[in-house]
Amino acid sequence: MKALASRGAQNHLAGEAAEHSVLRDYERRGYRLVHRRWRGRGGEIDLIARLGDEVVFVEVKQSRDFARAAESLGARQMERLHAAAAEFLAEEPAGQLTPMRFDVVLVDGTGQLEIIENAFGHG
C-alpha cells in the first residue's frame, strides 16, 4: 500500500512539474496566465491563458512518452473540458462568442513538450 501511495505522490509531482514547464513555455511566447487548475461544475482545466482577446484552454498530459500521453485524453474527458470551458466563458464579456481554442500539451518523461494547438473543437 505504501508503494502505491508513493507512486501516486510521484505522479502528482510529475504532473505539477509538467504544468509548470508548460506554463513557462506559454508565458515565454507572450501568453498571460488567467487561471491554473480552474475548477467549475463541469470539471477542471489545467491552464487557462490569454493571448490578446483569445482564451486558450490548455490540457497537460504527462507520461513516459508522447504516445502514452496522447492516449490518456479520451472522449469523456474532452466532454468535461468542453463543459468547464463553456462555464468559464459564460463569465466573459462576449460569452460563448469569445475567441477561444483548446490546446493539448504532451510532456514526455524527459520533460520535452509537444504542443498541439487547437487540438479539438468545441461542441
Image: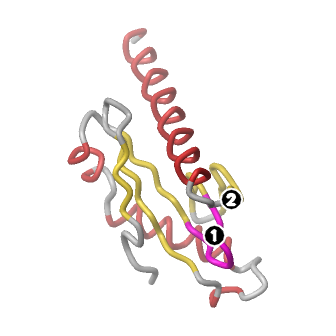
Marks 2 & 1, CB-CB < 8 Å contact: yes
Tag 2: residue type? Answer: Arg
The image shows residue 12, relative to residue 77, as above or below, that is: above
Q: On the rendered structure, is 32 left or right of 17?
A: right
Q: Is residue 50 left or right of residue 102?
A: right
Residue matched to label 1: 51
In the rendered image, the quadrant that contains the N terminus is top left
* Marked residue nearer the N-terminal end (2 or 1): 2
In front of the other: 27 or 54: 27
Residue 21 within the segment the image draws in magenta: no
Residue farthest to the front?
29
Residue drawn at x 50%, y 74% is: 101
Front one among 106 and 85: 106
* Residue 13 appears left or right of 54: left
**Where residue 32 is drawn, which disc sits there?**
2
In the rendered image, the quadrant that contains the C terminus is: bottom left
Residue furthest to the left in view is: 67
Q: Which residues are magenta?
A: 48-56
Q: Residues within 10 Å of mark 1 (few under 14, many from 20)?
A: some
Residue under the image location 68 percent in, 79 percent down: 53
**Residue 15 x, y percent position in the rendering:** 47, 35
Determine the residue positioned at 61% across, 52% down.
27
User: Could you tell me residue 7's position as x and y percent?
Assistant: 39, 19
Mark number, residue 103: none
Q: CA distance from mark 2 to mark 1?
A: 7 Å
Would you identify the image quadrant in which residue 73 lies? bottom left
